[in-house]
Amino acid sequence: MKKQFPTFGHLFLILFLFVLFSLPFGLIQSFTPKSWIAWMMLLGYAVPMYLTIWATRRIFDKQSHFNYAPKHLMILPVIIIVAYAFLVVGEFTVFLLPKPTGIWKKLFDMLNETITQVFNYPLAGFLMVVVAAPILEETLFRGVILKALLKKYAPFKAIMISAIAFGIFHLNPWQFLYATTLGLLLGYIYWKTRSLFYPIIIHMILNGTAFFAAHFAKVDAEQGIVEQLSGENLQKYLILVSIALVIIIMSYYFLENYFRNTSQELVLATQNPHKIAEIKKIMPSNIYLKSLKDIQFKGDLKETGQTLEENALQKLHQITRAYDVDALADDTGLEVDELNGAPGVYSARYAGEQATYADNVEKLLSEMKDKQNRAAQFKTVIAYSQGHKEYMATGILKGSIATQPRGNGGFGYDSVFIPEGYNQTFAEMGEAEKNKISHRAIALDELKKMINTLNK
Ligand code: IMP
């Protein structure tokens, strides 16, 4: 069986792809005249990164869309403060590592030299460090890797793995701890906002600070803290780290509280206006409902499963996998005892692909001609996702099939379905009455209870 993306093997493959795509640029770079070297470095970073993202998506996650929408702009100041607090703590993790000696020293010097070289070029350096790196790295690590991990694991584990992968990707021990620490913040913010906007902003602020410090204040960005901390300086820095930790903890509680009270968004994966109206009525007011049109989904949702459950999940996944949003999808079928549960999952196309409601009713009545046992049930299955976890709710309403169509209201099989304990068909009963007792109402009621428990 194919393992769900991303496994550790997949993560190493991504790293391998990046190294592979970088090789030709490394070669060209050694022949590049000095005046062009900065631009070559920018290309040698941005093109392999772009290709890695492109290849990863093509191989593992074709449907994926990236969301860069700026949301929750009110929390921007908190995000900026917390980004700097992480910078202070992140720098400290570099200090915790032993001073490099021997071959490590060589590697460390090489790394420093490359960074210094990049930082020395104002425009190409700026484009690489402050523009390209934040956008490309966040798209890959949060937009592709973390997004997929969140579907597989609980948020804490998913954020942890993506942060470590981000650390390893830097390919040296000094940036490993720093990048992993930052990866936790970037991952947390992505998980909460489902948008790459904040991770990119934070990444830009941090890289920008290092870039401008190196460029204008001539601070040796990588070497500074490791080499210079001792005695009184160390004490001062420890105080700064403590303050940063307090800020991080306070911001965490602030953000948790903020996100608990802001409205959730939920995409309704249905094109049927009857259903949308019914769902709207039962949803808590802090859930903001969006239609397929709102997220610019075009075309039809596929439903090719063998059961109602499979179809509901299939419709849900077409939305959640592509857009990384919470969503709700449902599937309904009429199950007739004498017909071994038919039309069931095929209710919409019982009399053929292009069948109208009237064609389906006609076929049903002809199949049921002369049948004494007219017992049937409507079954609705709702698949619901919240925060990358999926839930199902089911509603069943028992009844019987009338011998001929009665009433003008409703849709589908309403004119031939008589709910148990009633004499009228759904179509005779009127919409309000139907909506109180229907299979969909029962499923939605179960869903409502589930949502209320989840949001407690
Ligand atoms: P869907 O999968 O929920 O779109 O439903 C499939 C088919 O079941 C529809 O095309 C209708 O023919 C029928 N159906 C679903 N809900 C109802 C209902 O409330 N009353 C009557 N027919 C329904």
Image: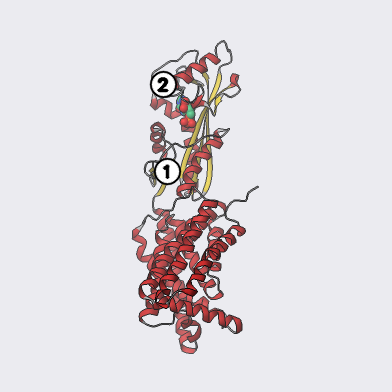
Q: In the image as oriented, which residue stretches furthest toward the bottom?
A: 231
User: Is residue 127 in sight in this rendering?
Assistant: yes
Is the C-beta separation of discs 1 and 2 under 8 Å? Answer: no
Lower position in the chain sequence, tag 1 or tag 2: 1
Q: Is residue 238 above or below residue 24?
A: below
Residue 290 % position (x, y): 38, 43
Image quadrant in which you'd find residue 40 = bottom left
Task: Name which residue lies at 41% across and 35% down.
Answer: 271
- The residue lying toward the viewer, choosing from 286 and 122, is 122
> Which dot, 1 or 2, sits closer to the camera?
1
Residue type beneath disc 2 = Met
Q: Which residue is mark 2?
A: 429
Q: Is residue 9 left or right of residue 453?
A: right
Image quadrant in which you'd find residue 85 = bottom left
The secondary element bearing badge 1 is classed as strand
Residue 210 % position (x, y): 41, 75
Checking the image for residue 69, the label placed there is none
Q: Is residue 41 above or below residue 399?
A: below
Image quadrant in which you'd find residue 13 = bottom right
Checking the image for residue 267, the label placed there is 1
Residue type beneath disc 1 = Val
Q: In the image as oriented, which residue stretches furthest toward the left?
A: 74
Between the residue at mark 1 and the residue at mark 2, the CA separation in whole angstroms equals: 30 Å
Specify few, some or many for label 2: CA neighbours under 10 Å numbering under 14, 14-19, or 20 or more. many
Task: Name which residue lies at 36% across and 75% down.
Answer: 122
